[in-house]
Image (tube, rainbow, N blue to C red):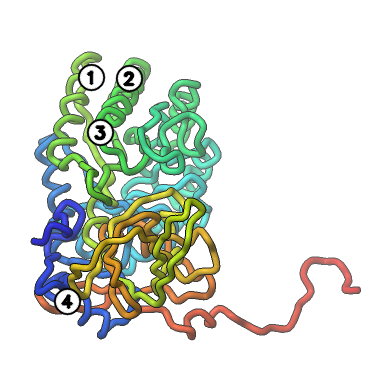
C-alpha cells in the first residue's frame, strides 16, 4: 500500500494501483463515472469486520458480564447497515422516530434496540413501546412520568435505563463533550439529581429500572475518562444496593471511542481500551462488594467512520495572495459543508489525497473548499497538495463514514450525495443520490384555511 494511504485512516481495501486509488477493487475514476460526484464510498468488508470486532472485543473483555454493543445509529444508518449490524450480533441505539423507522423497515429485533434522546416526543415513546424496544434511556424527570404513563396506557412494563451525568470532562472538542455538568444530557450525580431520578422511577409500576447509563463525549483517545465515569456510576449502583437490598443488572458506558482522521492520530484498539475499562470496572465492583453488572457500550464512529471515503471532483483552482506576501492555492470541489459539516462545526481535520492519478509535481500550500456561499465552507484548511491539480481531477477524503451523510443538508439546495457500497469489484447504491425532484417534493400549494375560533378579517 502506498505511504499516502495510511491503513489506520483508510478502509482495509483501499489501495493505490498504477497511481490511482481503488476501494473494493474498483478505481475511483470508474466509481465517479458510474455514480458521479460527490459520493460516499462504503467498504462493505471493512464495515462488517469492524462491527464484528467490537462485538467480539466486548465479549472478550467482560465474558459472562458482557451486555450489548449497541451500534449508534446517529453516526450513519440505513436499512442495509441495520441488517449488517444485526448479522454482526450488535444491538442498535436510536434517538429519533426516524432512526427507529429505519430499524423497523429493516426488521431489526426490537429487544436489541435502545431508544435514546434528551427530548423524546410522546409519539416517539409510543412508537418505541409499540415496537417492543428492549430499553428506553430516560433523560429527565418529565420523561420518567411520560414513559410511565404511556407504558401504563398500553399495559406494558417498559425496561428503562437512567442516563446519568458523571461529571467527567472528557478531553475532546467542547461541542461533543457530554459528560461534564453544564450540558443538556442526563441526571447529575454530584447534585443529587441522579438519586432523585432513581426514586422517581421506583414509584411507577409500569417502569422496570434495569440499570444506569452514561455517555461522556466523542472522539476520545484515552481510557481515563471512561474509567472515571465507570467508577462514579458504580458508586451509584452500590448506593442503590444499600438502599433497596437489590442490585441493578446493567451498566451502559456509552461510546465515544476515537478514530484516526489525520497522520499522528493514534486511536486505541477495541480490545485494548475495553480491557482497560473492564479491569477498572472489576476493581471498583470488588471495592464495594458489588456483583459485576452486565456491561453495554455504544460504538458508532469506530465502526462506520473508517469504512467510508468521500470522493469529489475538482471544479476550479485559484491562487490567492496572503497578507504576508505568500500565496495559497484554493482548490474548489463539487461538494462541501452540505456533505461534511464537521470542519465548520467542530474544526474537525481530515486527510485528503489526489485520487485519480499520482503526481510528482512540487507540493504547494493549499486549501480545499466547497461550492457553497460561505467563507467557512472549508473541507481541508491547510494541506500540501501537488501543484498540478487541475479541474477534473478527483480528490478522496477518508474516514467520512461517521456524521458525513447523517449530518448532510440541502444547503444552497444541493442534492445530498449517494452512499455506494463496494465489495470485491462490485458496486451498488444503498442510498441513492437525491434529485431536483426530491428537493421540490415537499413544495405544495394549498388554499389558506381558518385556524382557531377567531373570525377572519
* Among numbered discs 4 and 1, the one appearing first in the sequence: 4
Query: Measuring 88% from the left and 71% from the top, which residue is drawn there?
Result: 455
Name the residue carrying label 3: 222
Residue 221 visible (yes or no): yes
Nearer the observer, disc 4 or disc 1?
A: 4
Query: Measuring 47% from the left and 81% from the top, which residue is drawn there?
Result: 438
Q: Which mark is residue 284?
A: 1
* Among numbered discs 3 and 1, the one appearing first in the sequence: 3
C-alpha span from label 4 to label 1: 51 Å
Q: Residue 386 location in percent, x, y?
A: 27, 66
Name the residue carrying label 2: 235
- Circles 2 and 1, Cβ within 8 Å, touching? The answer is yes
Within the image, what quadrant is residue 427 found in?
Answer: bottom left
Query: Measuring 38% from the left and 28% from the top, which residue is drawn there?
Result: 168
Q: Residues within 10 Å of mark 3 (few under 14, many from 20)?
A: some
Q: Residue 412 location in percent, x, y?
A: 54, 72
Position of 433 relative to 406 (above/below): below
In front here: 419 or 115? 419
C-alpha span from label 2 to label 3: 22 Å
Name the residue carrying label 4: 27
The local secondary structure at tag 2 comes to helix
Amino acid at each position: 500500500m502506498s505511504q499516502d494511504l495510511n491503513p489506520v485512516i483508510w478502509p482495509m481495501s483501499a489501495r493505490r494501483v498504477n497511481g490511482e486509488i481503488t476501494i473494493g477493487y474498483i478505481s475511483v475514476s470508474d466509481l465517479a463515472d458510474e455514480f458521479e460526484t460527490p459520493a460516499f464510498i462504503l467498504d462493505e468488508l471493512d464495515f462488517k469486520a469492524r462491527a464484528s470486532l467490537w462485538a467480539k472485543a466486548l465479549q472478550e473483555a467482560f465474558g459472562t458480564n458482557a451486555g450489548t454493543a449497541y451500534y449508534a445509529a446517529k453516526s450513519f444508518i440505513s436499512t442495509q447497515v441495520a441488517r449488517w449490524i444485526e448479522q454482526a450480533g450488535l444491538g442498535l441505539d436510536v434517538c429519533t422516530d426516524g432512526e427507529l423507522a429505519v430499524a423497523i423497515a429493516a426488521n431489526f429485533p426490537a429487544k436489541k434496540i435502545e431508544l435514546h434522546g434528551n427530548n423524546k416526543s410522546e409519539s416517539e415513546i409510543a412508537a418505541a413501546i409499540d415496537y417492543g424496544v428492549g430499553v428506553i434511556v430516560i433523560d429527565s424527570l418529565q420523561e420518567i412520568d411520560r414513559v410511565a404513563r404511556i407504558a401504563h396506557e398500553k399495559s406494558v412494563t417498559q425496561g428503562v435505563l437512567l442516563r446519568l451525568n458523571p461529571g467527567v470532562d472528557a478531553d475532546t472538542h467542547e461541542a461533543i463533550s457530554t459528560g461534564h455538568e453544564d450540558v443538556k444530557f442526563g441526571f447529575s450525580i454530584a447534585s443529587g439529581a441522579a438519586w432523585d431520578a432513581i426514586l422517581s422511577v421506583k414509584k411507577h409500576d409500569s417502569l422496570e429500572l434495569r440499570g444506569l447509563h452514561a455517555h461522556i463525549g466523542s472522539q476520545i483517545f484515552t481510557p481515563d475518562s471512561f474509567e472515571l465515569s465507570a467508577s462514579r456510576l458504580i458508586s451509584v449502583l452500590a448506593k442503590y444496593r444499600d438502599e433497596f437490598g437489590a442490585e441493578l443488572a446493567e451498566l451502559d458506558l456509552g461510546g465515544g471511542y476515537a478514530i484516526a482522521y489525520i497522520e499522528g492520530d493514534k486511536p486505541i484498539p477495541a480490545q485494548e481500551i475495553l480491557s482497560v475499562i473492564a479491569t477498572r470496572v472489576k476493581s471498583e465492583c470488588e471495592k464495594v462488594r458489588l456483583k459485576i453488572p452486565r456491561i453495554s457500550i455504544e460504538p458508532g464512529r469506530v465502526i462506520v467512520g473508517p469504512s467510508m471515503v468521500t470522493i469529489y471532483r475538482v471544479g476550479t483552482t485559484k491562487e490567492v495572495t496572503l497578507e504576508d506576501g505568500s500565496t495559497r492555492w484554493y482548490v474548489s470541489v463539487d461538494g462541501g459543508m452540505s456533505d461534511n459539516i464537521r470542519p465548520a462545526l467542530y474544526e474537525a481535520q481530515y486527510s485528503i489525497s489526489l485520487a485519480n492519478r499520482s503526481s510528482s509535481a512540487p507540493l504547494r500550500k493549499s486549501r480545499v473548499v466547497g461550492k457553497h456561499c460561505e467563507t467557512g465552507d472549508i473541507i481541508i484548511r491547510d494541506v500540501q497538495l501537488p501543484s498540478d491539480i487541475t479541474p477534473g481531477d478527483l480528490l478522496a477524503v477518508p474516514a467520512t463514514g461517521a456524521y458525513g451523510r447523517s449530518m448532510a443538508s440541502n444547503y444552497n439546495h444541493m442534492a445530498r450525495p449517494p452512499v455506494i457500497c463496494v465489495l470485491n469489484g462490485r458496486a451498488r447504491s444503498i442510498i441513492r443520490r437525491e434529485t431536483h425532484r426530491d428537493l421540490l417534493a415537499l413544495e405544495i400549494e394549498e388554499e389558506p384555511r381558518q385556524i382557531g375560533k377567531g373570525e377572519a378579517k
